[in-house]
Amino acid sequence: MALNKIQESSDGTKKLIFDKGHIAVVIPTNSLSKKSMQGNKSQEILNANSEQSKDEKNTVCISCQVGCPVGCKFCYTGKLGFKCNLSPEEIFEQAKIAQDIIGKKIQSIVFMGMGEPTLNLKNVLEAAERIHKELPISYNRITISTSCLNTLDRLENIHFNIALSLHSPFDKVRKELIPGAASLREIISFTKKYLDKSNNKKYVMVEYSMIKGVNDSEKDLKKLISFKWPKKMLFNLIEFNPSGNFQKSDEEIVEHFKQEIIKAGWKCFIRKSRGSDIEAACGMLDR
Ligand code: SF4
């Protein structure tokens, strides 16, 4: 596997493009806006929002497939279609090469690049174990993200962190945005089983891209906080990168969602977009 090209964003984010067309993104985490921060538990599940230290820390977002078969409506990778699964070696090497390039230890890894991990799970888990042992990075700093398809149960017994891409509290809207989406009932049931099996030692992260007029109404907010989510959930409200007819929500609305989710008893963070000027941000791989 060869690294073809490196691009660097004005915010310090680096995009690593490999020969098969897959991409890894290195996100320095000490230059984040303080506005995007609230709460004190994020680093337990995803160090991407940490501003604990003045020393630069880096999160690396890696890919498990080239293209993606899921075809989420708001995602450029989804529009590429599916090219192929990546082998354990090809997945591991993204993290290893990223660490070599920045010349210092990576703090955390997120499987949020190209592809849906549950559709290449054997290879993802093998690579994640190698990352844990050889880089090394602890289990609670490696996060596997899923769009929550009917393959969600495959993640029930894993000992890495989990991020669930929700994007709407309504099944009808979820299914329109994410073809093959599991129902909210299945997702909530999964979070309970996963947390029970971890003896409540872990958190589960909910990823919610804030899309104007699609999932940012008061009705969406009320529905989202009406569910009986376990207490050990973290909500990440993601600054959406405009795609096709989809636009990002207004900042006041995102802040309002955050405050109401916190009032309802859960941790909540706003994740600002990083690397959008080089198309390295969420949902922009590969445009
Ligand atoms: S959001 Fe994730 S699962 Fe959906 S198409 Fe994009 S890469 Fe695939």
Image (spheres, grey):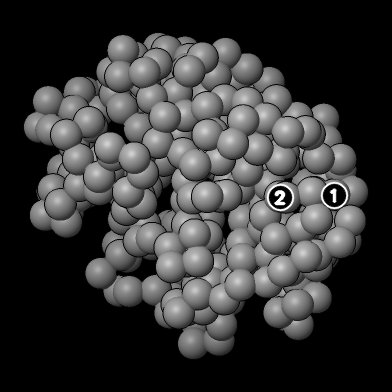
Number of the front mark, 1 or 2? 2
Q: Amino acid at mark 2?
A: His
Q: How many marks?
A: 2
Q: Residue at x 20, y 47 (%)?
A: 249
Q: Residue at x 65, y 38 (%)?
A: 67
- Horizontal side of 130 relative to 163 (left or right) equals right
Residue 259 seen: no
Work out whether mark 1 precedes mark 2 in sequence or the reverse, and give the earlier one. 2
Residue count near mark 1 (Cα–Cα under 10 Å), binned few <14, some 14–19, many ≥20: many
- Horizontal side of 172 relative to 17 (left or right) equals left
Q: Nearer the viewer, residue 247 or 181?
A: 247
Residue count near mark 2 (Cα–Cα under 10 Å), binned few <14, some 14–19, many ≥20: many
Residue 7, image x, y percentages: 61, 72
**Element at badge 1?**
helix
Q: Residue at x 73, y 33 (%)?
A: 83
Residue 250, image x, y percentages: 15, 52
| Residue at numbered disc 2 | 22
Q: Residue at x 77, y 33 (%)?
A: 84
Judge whether 189 appears above or below 38 on screen: above
Q: Nearer the viewer, residue 187 or 98?
A: 98
Judge whether 249 appears above or below 52 on screen: above
Q: Amino acid at mark 1?
A: Glu
- Horizontal side of 227 relative to 120 (left or right) equals left
| Residue at numbered disc 1 | 90
Q: Are marks 1 and 2 in contact (CB under 8 Å)?
A: yes
Q: Nearer the viewer, residue 204 or 67?
A: 67
Residue 233, image x, y percentages: 41, 38
Judge whether 165 appears above or below 132 on screen: above
